[in-house]
Image: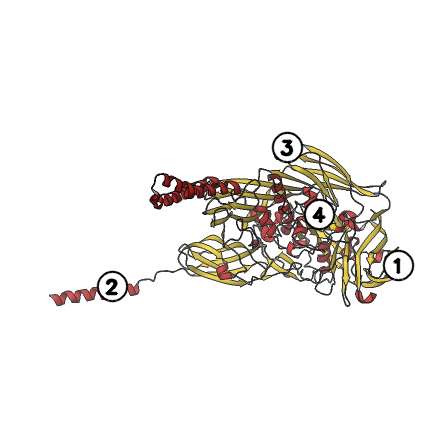
Amino acid sequence: MLYSGRLAGWLSVLALMALMAFAPPAQVPVIELSAQAGFDGRFRDGEWLPVMVQARNEGDSVSGRLVVRPETSGAGITNTFSTPVDLPTGAAQSITLYITAQSFASQVRVELIDDQGQVLASETVPIRAAQPKDRIYVVLSQSPAGAVSMTGATFGGSAAFQTNWRVEDLPTLASALTPVDVILFSDIDSSAMSSAQQRALADWVSDGGHLIVTGGAAWERTASGLVDLLPIEPSGSITTPDLNALARWLRVSPATSLTGETVLATGSLRPGAQVLVSAGDTPLLVRRKHGAGTVDYLAADPNTAPLRGWSGLTALWQTLQLTVAPQPGWTKGFTQWDLASDAVEILPGFNLLPDALPLCGFLGLYIILIGPVNYFVLSRLNRRELAWITIPLLIVVFSALSWLLGFNLRGTEATLSRLAVVRSWPESDRAIVDGLVGLLSPRRAQYNLTLAGGSALRPLPRVADGNVLTTNVQSSIDIRQTNVFTASDFAVDASFIAGFSTTGTVEKPAIGGSASLALDRATGLWRVRGLVRNESDQTLENPVVLARGVAHRLEAPLAPGDSAAFDFTLPEETAPPPLLATSAAGTPRYAFSFYNAMLQAQTVNDILGTEPLRPGARLTSEDEEQRRRRLFLASFVNDFYAYASTTAASTVSTGRADHVYLAGWNAGTSPLPVELEGAAWNSNDTTLYLIELEVEHVPPTGNVTITSDLFSWTAEEQTGLRDFAPFNLSLQPGDQVAFRFIPFPSAVLNEVRTLKIALERTSIGDHAIPIEVFNWLDGVWEEVTLIERIWQAEDPEPYLGPQNMVMVRVTSDLVGGFIRIDRLHVEQQGRF
């Protein structure tokens, strides 16, 4: 009987094992990841870049998040960035994660981590930082002939990198496009863009981006999703026998003919559009300003004959970039992170440490009670042995009092320090907002900080020179991205400040105005007259109108509903700005760039109207607020120092060109929509508004001089590793540099009668000085001699390029091997 029972048991076990052998195995997640980072692996130091991930799941459903973190990607990724992801069985998804990286970063590792913290899949892609002066181009095309190449369009010895995208690759975050110099749409269905992509593209253009759109036979589908941005509203097409007008405008060699039938898109011009080139009566190349950026429309398709393979196509891409208006020094966002950290750590009227006198009084009372008073009382009672009890008791009591006093002094609310700059333009219905947020914690706690409205959020880059009590040195914070950005579950110690930077857009504030810019024949100077209006619900304090070389202060704050007129004259001459200023890290400064110099930058002083406070001075709350504003301004304002003259106005170029701006402050409100979990909070808010006014340029009649301050410039063909500028120019033996001088868009003469090139204060005196000027008709450099430091051409036609630009080359060996020039500049005379 026992044997039979055992046999039955063994048979049952064997049967169960057989069933298990034939049962289907449990599924496990099988994840495939592929990724592309940046712009074909290129990125810019400290700027946002997209990481586009393709995820496929052939196993069980997975819920988790995609993560890029410094622990696996390296120290070049300073923070953790993540986004949630749900992958059902058989699902394939495209996910974009936005990150920032430092210049030495070499790779990005994307990991899929499930809700239990297990890494299910990963993919590593290489990245490499572009140099500050390098160009990054994005081309979107579905042409059977392939994408147009723009990589030949380089400047000053820099490199150019191009990435070819599909429409679905376009980010929905405008900040992720900040590293890009030009985006080209050609022969592609732009209507496939989502509304979020269209908005991001428009915001990028408003923030200074350059968009080029082409026509040709595919004009309708290419323009379909871009109509609101274009300078022309395409409605049809025609066929033209040649595009030689384009070659003539570029001043390329006559041998490069553009003969051949070509389809041109046609349509009606939008307000503010400027026709650069026409093929007969049909606009061939049209431009329109949009915010701080530019939109160019080429009516032909560059991927079809006769443009396809044309040797002048690179010159076209270069010229389009060189003939835009220069940008003021505040358009590149935060660049001086140490100053940004200092600014966000100042809370006017708030002292992180208790006052010294009450603290000393409290300590003195403690010492007196625990010492003399305790001894005297116990002596009078003749119970000195009780000191073993009274001293510990007094210590406990005073410790409790200290804790309660500190608790009450710190309070229970966190304090947010919010600083923001709002920039708007007449052509755009959106405004760009860059901001700083500092979180002061009353005690050590965990927080979640969310920035609503689609704005990007990240911790301030680490700095090592902050105050020991107010430091931004933080551990890696997880920036979680959904439809909003959240700094998730980060710790802040008591009385420490965690700093963050933000960038995004808001509706344009109802603040604006108009101005006219006309030449006053009586004085020979340009006169600016206009009106500013405040139709918002905010009061603008300390309003000032900014123009080229001028800061005109209004007499009173601009309250809601107020307007104010202004009338002033521009100075005789100021330093011309460089045109292709890139991100701040690479923006050339032609003088000393150190902490105090940035705090005293011309634009900073123009907006504040005050000088920096003396070091060591006792600060009132008003002084602290002024210092806070000065540091904030200096963290994103980048003027270009020239030091070419003895007058202060001409030593600095602010890049305002022929634009007019209204600047004003508002305290007590902020455009940064912050949500904080972890404590109740209050805020200390300061906002700067920089409003570009609508400017009417009144062209003067008769003969007019386009002075050097009405030109921008860029350095090309330079040898050596130094940055060269037409100011304080020092050339060693073997050095050579060519400068291209481009009139502002409003200063392009219809007829140039005289061209003058002049030098100021050279190391070789007034001797005959040979330089070279480019002859555009023959495509060669011509050596000319400056007599008494001036050369003048009465027949300037051969030396004028597109939009009347002029190229001048200086070679040290032509003048004996060493030369120093304080200033090299160009003037033109003629008629509009």
- Tell me which amino acid carries mark 1: Ile
- Residue extending farthest to the left is 1
Distance between the alpha carbons at the discs numbered 1 and 2: 107 Å
Numbered disc in front, either 4 or 1: 4
Q: Residue at x 81, y 64 (%)?
A: 780
User: Are circles 2 and 3 on residues that touch, CB within 8 Å?
Assistant: no
Q: Secondary structure at mark 2?
A: helix
Residue that mark 1 sits on? 787
Residue that mark 2 sits on? 16
In the displayed structure, does residue 200 sit left or right of residue 552? Answer: left
Q: Nearer the viewer, residue 705 or 215?
A: 705
User: Are circles 4 and 1 on residues that touch, CB within 8 Å?
Assistant: no
- Residue extending farthest to the top is 561
Numbered disc in front, either 4 or 3: 4
Residue 15 in sight from this viewpoint: yes
- Tell me which amino acid carries mark 2: Leu
- Tell me which amino acid carries mark 4: Gln
- Tell me which amino acid carries mark 3: Pro
In the displayed structure, does residue 363 sit left or right of residue 170? Answer: left
Numbered disc in front, either 2 or 3: 3
Give the numbered dot on residue 560: 3
Q: Secondary structure at mark 3?
A: loop
Q: Secondary structure at mark 4?
A: helix
Which of the two labelled residues, at mark 3 and mark 1, occupies the earlier sequence position? Answer: 3
Which of the two labelled residues, at mark 1 and mark 2, occupies the earlier sequence position? Answer: 2
Q: Secondary structure at mark 1?
A: loop
Distance between the alpha carbons at the discs numbered 4 and 1: 35 Å
How many circles with numbers are drawn on the protein?
4
Which of the two labelled residues, at mark 4 and mark 2, occupies the earlier sequence position? Answer: 2
Residue that mark 4 sits on? 602
